[in-house]
Amino acid sequence: MKIEYIFKLEHNLELQYEIDIDRKPDPSRDLSLEPEWTSLSHCKCSNCPLGSDNSHCPAALDLRKVVDDFKDLPAIKKASVTVVSAEREYLKMVGLEEGLRSLMGLIMASSHCPILSHLSPMARNHLPFSTMDEFISRSVSTYLTAQYFVHRDGGEPDWELKGLIDTNKKLQLVNQAFWQRIHSACDKDSNLKALLSFFTMSSSVSYSLESQLQKLKKDFV
């Protein structure tokens, strides 16, 4: 399954990214050519389970080209962003912060990071430019679907969403460390603000899920 992002900026600058949701690590990739900030030891996440047999952060390697392409661009710069999947196409004029948040979120959620991989169902059902309400609704719906299968298979489901909150607390640690990881690689703020925006959404699940759900309650009762 592949999803394409096309950024059209001023002066006819066009940047394209094809994200394979089911991609595998490339064993032929020459990691000696990768920048220092992609090394696993560089601002390593405090909760990273990867050992010394992994020289580089898998999510950093996946994001390297995007970070390089946008490192000199300000977050407020506008771009026409087209997102194409097999089922549908989206088009929106946005600031780079919003467009990059959507693209980087997709890349990180489909990476081989053991923690970010918890978001893989969200990547498979990707919704570009999602609002906070949409993010909360999709996060909870995805988690409860997984709990249904736990229940059907004879396990003990978590209907109180405790596991969802715990997972997003772990994701916050990843987001914070990743922001530090790419900080030295960026002269402008588009990448950094995109990650902060992504971080804010994870924070809303960790610390204010109940209040966020109350905002959605009127649509269900």
Image (cartoon, rainbow, N blue to C red):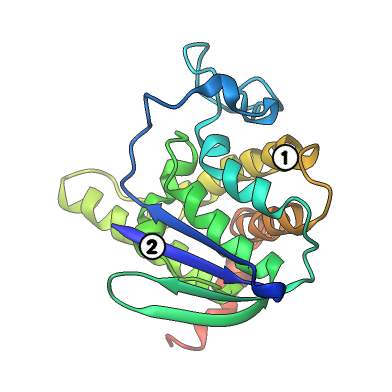
Q: Secondary structure at mark 1?
A: helix
Residue 101, position in %: x, y? 62, 61
Residue 196, position in %: x, y? 72, 55
Residue 53, position in %: x, y? 47, 12
Asked whether residue 162 is in view, the answer is no
Which part of the image, by quadrant, shows the N terminus?
Answer: bottom left
Residue farthest toward the top in the current orientation of the protein: 52
Q: Seen in the image, is 78 located left or right of residue 20?
A: right
Which residue, given by chain and number where applicable, does mark 1 sit on? Answer: 182
Q: Is residue 28 above or below residue 105?
A: above
Which residue, given by chain and number where applicable, does mark 2 sit on? Answer: 3
Q: Residue at x 51, y 41 (%)?
A: 62
Q: Amino acid at mark 1?
A: Ile
Residue 16, position in %: x, y? 51, 61
Residue farthest toward the right in the current orientation of the protein: 187
Q: Amino acid at mark 2?
A: Ile
Q: Residue at x 65, y 69 (%)?
A: 98
Q: Is residue 210 above or below residue 184?
A: below
Q: Residue at x 51, y 47 (%)?
A: 108
Q: Residues within 10 Å of mark 1 (few under 14, many from 20)?
A: many
Name which quarter of the figure residue 100 lies in.
Answer: bottom right
Could you tell me how far apart the alpha carbons at marks 1 and 2 are, in whole angstroms?
A: 24 Å
Q: Residues within 10 Å of mark 2 (few under 14, many from 20)?
A: many
Q: Secondary structure at mark 2?
A: strand
Q: Seen in the image, is 49 located left or right of residue 185?
A: left
Which of the two discs, 1 and 2, labels the residue nearer the N terminus?
Answer: 2
Q: Is residue 15 above or below residue 156?
A: below
